[in-house]
């Protein structure tokens, strides 16, 4: 006994495809069969049925259709398999307002890991349901809504978002898509009246932060604050040095005032230049990101249009091919019906001729019998006349 998928059904036999790739025949039993149905069967004519050629099975239109459907299913299964099996972390995103939570996402930007970094974060995570494989934007919005619902935004309106890639040298296209996801999250958070700060780090920063029991966002924020404090301290030290120098220079009060004024002006000017430069860099980055987003959107739209055109073209060709095969099949059926009609007419003509021949033979036999009777009668009459 073997197992196989039904590829063709006729009046007496079934044609089946086995898991080994063989096309075998089995006797049709008194039951209903469907193309594509998997059944157990006993092969017949084993020597003749072994491994039919790939093209011989295509002589049947139904078999072609079933085989094409099976092939498409196999291709789709192979194509979609990586998406269902993607459980590796591609990037991390941390959310800090008072609850601290870290999300790990795969290349499809679906959340596959959640780690709360404090008790407040655990309370938020405990309220999330069916978060596995949710889109990063959707789950982030749920987290923010839960944070607001639990009152953590009443006294604190600043939220820190930290991002880091799992591996160095991620593909540029993937990075751009990740940046687009973060930009979408930023746009959504703007509607929540929250002051948003986004910091970027590396996987090394994340590991250091984890050792300290912090999210990567808080770690980078702390690092930036320390840098600002060091810069402020350095400025204060410089100011103290200037003041001390001025105080030590008792001979020229006016000179001291001028130097202090100049120093203050230089410091103020440097600060303004630094702020201008920082604002300029931010604007340039935002413009570049917006430009890249537009270019990506155009490219995506172009790919979608080309794909739709290709699909439409393939559908038209497939439809023409099916119509052509149907016409050929109709011609074959008409031809077969015509041949059957001719055979039927020939059979009827032969039967009619046979009946006419039998009838003529009977009439001839009857005529012969009457002739014989007439001859016998005449003979008797002759004998009677001779006796007289």
Image: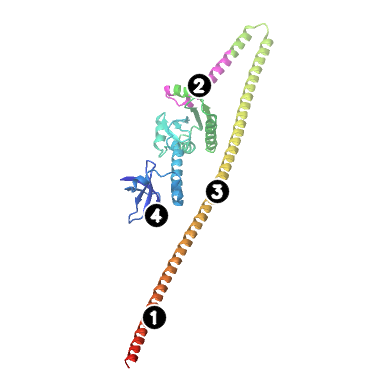
In percent of width and height, residue 222 lies at: 49, 23
Q: Give residue 290's position: percent from left, percent from top.
A: 60, 34
How crowded pointer 3 is (Cα within 10 Å; few <14, some 14-19, many 20+) is rated as few
- Find out whether residue 232 is within the magenta segment: yes
In the rendered image, which quarter is residue 89 located in?
top left
**Cα distance between the residues tagged 3 and 4:** 29 Å
* SS at mark 3 in the image: helix
The label shown at residue 367 is 1
Residue marked by disc 4: 10
User: Real-space Cα distance between discs 3 and 1?
Assistant: 74 Å
**CA separation in Å, label 2 and label 3:** 62 Å
* Label 4: element kind: loop
In contact (CB < 8 Å): disc 1 and disc 4? no
Numbered label attached to residue 211: none
The CA distance from mark 1 to mark 4 is 55 Å
Choose mark 4 or mark 2, whichever is in front.
4
Q: Nearer the viewer, residue 248 or 321?
A: 321
Mark 3 or mark 1: whose residue is earlier in sequence: 3
Quarter holding the C terminus?
Answer: bottom left
- Can you identify the residue that label 2 sits on? 223
Q: How crowded is mark 1: few (under 14 residues within 10 Å), some or many (20 or more)?
A: few
């Amino acid at each position: 006994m073997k197992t196989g998928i039904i590829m063709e059904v006729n009046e007496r036999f079934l044609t089946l495809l086995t898991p080994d790739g063989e096309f075998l025949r089995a006797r049709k039993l008194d039951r209903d069969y469907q193309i594509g149905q998997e059944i157990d069967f006993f092969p017949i004519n084993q020597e003749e049925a072994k491994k039919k050629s790939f093209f011989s099975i295509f002589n049947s239109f139904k078999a072609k259709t079933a085989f094409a459907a099976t092939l498409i299913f196999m291709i789709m299964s192979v194509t979609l398999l990586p998406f269902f099996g993607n459980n590796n972390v591609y990037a991390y995103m941390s959310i800090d307002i008072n609850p601290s939570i870290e999300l790990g996402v795969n290349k499809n930007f679906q959340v596959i890991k959640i780690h709360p970094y404090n008790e407040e974060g655990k309370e938020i995570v405990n309220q999330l349901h069916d978060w596995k494989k949710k889109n990063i934007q959707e789950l982030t919005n749920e987290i923010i809504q839960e944070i607001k619902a639990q009152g953590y935004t009443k006294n604190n309106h600043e939220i820190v978002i930290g991002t880091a890639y799992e591996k160095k040298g991620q593909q540029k296209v993937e990075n751009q898509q990740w940046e687009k996801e973060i930009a979408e999250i930023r746009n959504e958070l703007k509607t929540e009246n929250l002051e948003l700060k986004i910091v970027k780090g590396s996987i090394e920063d994340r590991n250091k932060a984890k050792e300290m029991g912090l999210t990567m966002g808080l770690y980078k924020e702390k690092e930036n604050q320390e840098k600002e404090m060091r810069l402020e301290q350095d400025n204060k030290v410089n100011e103290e040095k200037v003041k001390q120098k001025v105080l030590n220079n008792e001979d020229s009060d006016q000179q001291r005032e001028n130097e202090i004024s100049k120093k203050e002006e230089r410091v103020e000017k440097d600060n303004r230049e630094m702020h201008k430069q920082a604002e300029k860099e931010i604007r340039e980055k935002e413009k570049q990101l917006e430009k890249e987003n537009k270019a990506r959107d155009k490219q995506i739209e172009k790919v979608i249009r080309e794909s739709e055109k290709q699909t439409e073209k393939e559908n038209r060709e497939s439809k023409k091919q099916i119509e052509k095969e149907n016409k050929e099949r109709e011609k074959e059926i008409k031809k077969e019906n015509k041949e059957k009609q001719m055979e039927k007419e020939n059979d009827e003509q032969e039967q009619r001729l046979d009946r006419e021949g039998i009838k003529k033979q009977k009439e001839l036999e009857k005529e012969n019998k009457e002739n014989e009777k007439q001859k016998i009668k005449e003979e008797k009459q002759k004998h009677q006349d001779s006796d007289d």
